[in-house]
Image: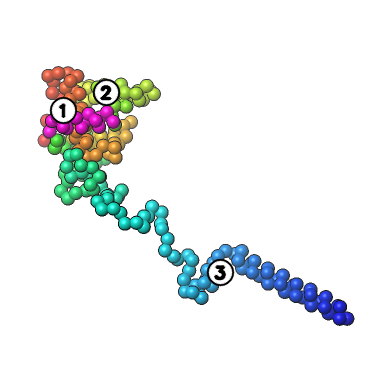
Amino acid sequence: MGDMMSNTMKHTGSGTRFWTLLLVVGATSAGCNPMDDALVAIFGRSMREQPAIQPYQDPRTPPEGAVSFASGNFPAAPGQVAVGQAEGTPVPPPVTPFQLLTGDPAASDLPNPIAPGAVSLARGEVMFNRSCVPCHGVTGAGDGLVTQAGVPVRSLLTPEARILSDGYIYSLIRVGRGAMPSYAHQVTHYDRWHVVNYVRQLQSAAIPGEPAGQQEN
C-alpha cells in the first residue's frame, strides 16, 4: 500500500511538473507579447518602446559646415559646390521634360548669367569631357563610345542644334530629353552654363564665322 501511494505521488508530481512546463512553453511560444506586457505591468516600460537608431539616422552631431543630402546643391557663386541653397541664389524654377519638348519659355528662354570667358570655357571643357563625351564625342559630333553599342546620339553641330537657345541647352542638361537622361545631379547649376558656353565654342569651331544660338530675351 505504501509503495502504491509513493508511486502515485511520484506520478502526480511528474504530471504537475509536466503541465507546468507545458503551460510555460505555451505562454512563451505565443511570442514576446505576454512577457512584454508583464514587464510593462512590473517596470512600467515596454521592450517595444525604447530609444533606437532609426534607418539612415546618425546620432552624431554633423561637423561644422556640413550640408545634408536633402539640401539643394545650389552653389552661391561659380566655383563653389555643396554649400546648400544660399538665399538669393539665381537658380531657375524646376521645369519638366514636357515643358522642354513644347518650347515653354520657362525652360528655353533663360538668360545665360555666365560670360564665355577663359575660366568658364576651361571649366565647361572639364565638365563636357566628364559627362558629355561618352555620348556626344570630343567634338560634339555625336560619335562617342556609346554609339558603338548601337545607341543613336544626336550631334551638337547640326543646324538644328546650333539654333537652340542657351536656356534650352541648360534645361536639356537639367531634365533630359528622349534617350538622354537628366544630368542634374552630375552637373550643377553654374557648371551647366559653363557646358553651354563650351558647346557654343565647339559649334563655332565646326563652322567658323557662323554664330550659334538664338537671341535671348
**Badge 3 or badge 1: first in the primary sequence:** 3
Crowding at label 1, few (<14), some or many (≥20) Cα neighbours within 10 Å? Answer: some
Give the residue drawn at x 29%, y 40%: 185
Q: Which mark is residue 34?
A: 3
The stretch in magenta equals 115-130
For marks 3 and 1, give the CA distance.
74 Å
Amino acid found under the numbered disc labelled 3: Pro
Tag in front: 2 or 3: 2
Q: Which mark is residue 138?
A: 2
Q: Is residue 24 visible?
A: yes
* Residue under label 1: 213
Q: Is residue 100 visible?
A: no
| Residue 54 coordinates in the image, percent (x, y) | 41, 57
For marks 2 and 3, give the CA distance.
69 Å
**In the structure shown, which secondary structural element does the residue marked by tag 1 occupy?**
loop
Give the residue drawn at x 20%, y 32%: 123
Q: Quadrant of the N terminus?
A: bottom right
**In the structure shown, which secondary structural element does the residue marked by tag 2 occupy?**
loop
Amino acid found under the numbered disc labelled 2: Val
